Image (cartoon, grey):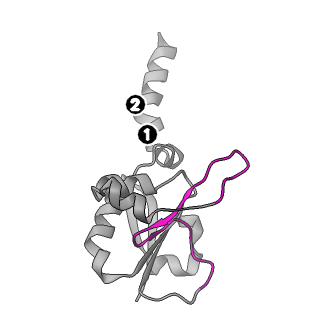
Amino acid sequence: MILNFYSWDFYFNQYPKRAVVTRAWQCGYRELADYVKSNYNNFDKFYITRKNGQPYIYFLFYFKYLPSEYQKQAVLTPPDEYGFGQIKEFDKFYFELPSTKDINKSVIIGYPDDFEEDEKPYLKEIKVGPETMFMIKEIK
């Protein structure tokens, strides 16, 4: 009986508060899509990490993107060792972080560990509960 109580306590109270869990459930994409929608016309490119899955699907869903428009624009990566390709880009969305610092009028969206400690105080955050899901660097 006591073990049952601890199991339920962990499941309902402890487990959902862990950052690794909220990332595994891919929380924060709705909030991120809201940010991108409100800044869509201010920037030319949005670079978004794909460290944890394939985020393009969330942008298609939250932007209510027409399949016919998406299919005309989508660029795939070459197949990986398992034979699967990833979505590399469509519209203003690039699903990899840029390798060069020479970019303008762009937004870089990544996890906290994608950015240097000294630049974090100047970045915007997308939080779910107390956890920072994404950090946003705006380059004007």
| Residue 103, image x, y percentages | 52, 87
Residue drawn at x 38%, y 63% as measured from the top left: 126
Q: Nearer the viewer, residue 100 or 138?
A: 100
SS of the residue under disc 2: helix
Point out the image quarter for the C terminus. bottom left
Report which residue position mark 2 lands on.
12
| Residue 92, image x, y percentages | 40, 73
The amino acid type of the residue labelled 1 equals Pro
Report which residue position mark 1 lands on.
16
Above or below 128: residue 115: below
For the stretch drawn in magenta, the main secondary structure is loop
Residue 101 visible within the image: yes
| Residue 115's disc number | none
* Circle 2 Cα neighbour tier, 10 Å, few/some/many (<14 / 14–19 / ≥20): few
Q: Where does the magenta region start and end?
A: 78-100
Residue drawn at x 50%, y 76% as measured from the top left: 120
Residue drawn at x 30%, y 58% as measured from the top left: 65
Residue 80 part of the magenta-drawn span: yes
| Residue 100, image x, y percentages | 61, 84
